[in-house]
Image: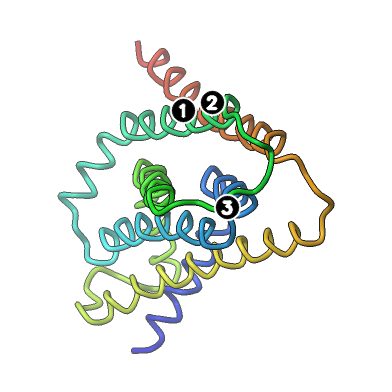
Amino acid sequence: MIGFLLRGILIGLLFGVPAGAVGAMTVQRTWSSGVKAGLLTGLGSSVADCFYASVGAFGLTLISEFLLKGQDIIHCIGGVLILAMGIGLLLKKGSGRVKEAEASDYLRMFFSSFAVGITNPAAIITFLLAFSWFGITAETGLLKGILLVGGVFLGTFIWWGILAAATEALKKKAKQIDLTKLNKVFGAILSLLGAAVLIGFFSEISSMT
């Protein structure tokens, strides 16, 4: 039974390592607002991963079919969201120094990363492939499925915790860095990632016409 939890943790770790947009958000927010901000950003993504892992683990075919059929539109929405956050960082003005985040900021950090994670319906395919590799099927049962999904959550969140802790450690050792310039760097990264998603979407649309 415990094997399903351990396999879920391993899958979560493997799935979390290709950080992408959420990784950039986690590093930027940890650097600008501390470890708590980075952890809450990672938490939002982990919750989104748990949703898709649940769809795969429990064989919720109606949901998976609906999401996969509409994945291009959903992914496009995610691209717009990432691009908007990137532009927001590029245009953000401030003192250039680290500032403690407020409660409303933490909520925004959580829900923005959750939105980025949930607008990636192709994650269902990734989890299904991972489950298949580890010999896991939808007939594993309720308890084993819960342990598996719980393991995925732990695995992904462990990765975000490692990334946030590493960023905080680097920040303490690094020389003083102007936060405004750093925001522009991460704003550019997010803008490029969002633009890449949208270019891929419109390229696919044009090829179908």
Task: Give how far apart the Cα atoms at labels 3 and 2 are.
Answer: 19 Å
Q: Nearer the viewer, residue 128 or 36?
A: 36
Identify the residue shown where x is 51% and y is 56%.
37
Identify the residue shown where x is 48% and y is 66%.
157
Question: Circle 1 is placed at which residue position?
Answer: 84
Question: Circle 2 is placed at which residue position?
Answer: 87
Question: Circle 3 is placed at which residue position?
Answer: 33
Quarter of the figure with residue 45: bottom left
Q: Nearer the viewer, residue 160 or 11?
A: 160
Task: Give how far apart the Cα atoms at labels 2 and 1 are.
Answer: 5 Å
Please rate how many residues cluster around mark 2, counting C-alpha atoms within 10 Å: few if below 14, some from 14 to 19, many from 20.
many
Please rate how many residues cluster around mark 3, counting C-alpha atoms within 10 Å: few if below 14, some from 14 to 19, many from 20.
some
How did the renderer colour the structure? Answer: rainbow
Q: Nearer the viewer, residue 33 or 198?
A: 33
Quarter of the figure with residue 94: top right
Residue 138: image location, x then y, percent: 24, 68
Badge 1 element? helix
Looking at this rendering, what residue extends furthest in the left direction? 62
Task: Give how far apart the Cα atoms at labels 1 and 3 are.
Answer: 20 Å
Residue 30: image location, x then y, percent: 60, 54
Question: In the picture provided, is 150 more to the left or to the right than 140?
Answer: right
Q: Amino acid at mark 3?
A: Ser
Question: In the picture provided, is 94 more to the left or to the right than 51?
Answer: right
Quarter of the figure with residue 103: bottom left
Sequence order check, earlier mark of 1 and 3: 3
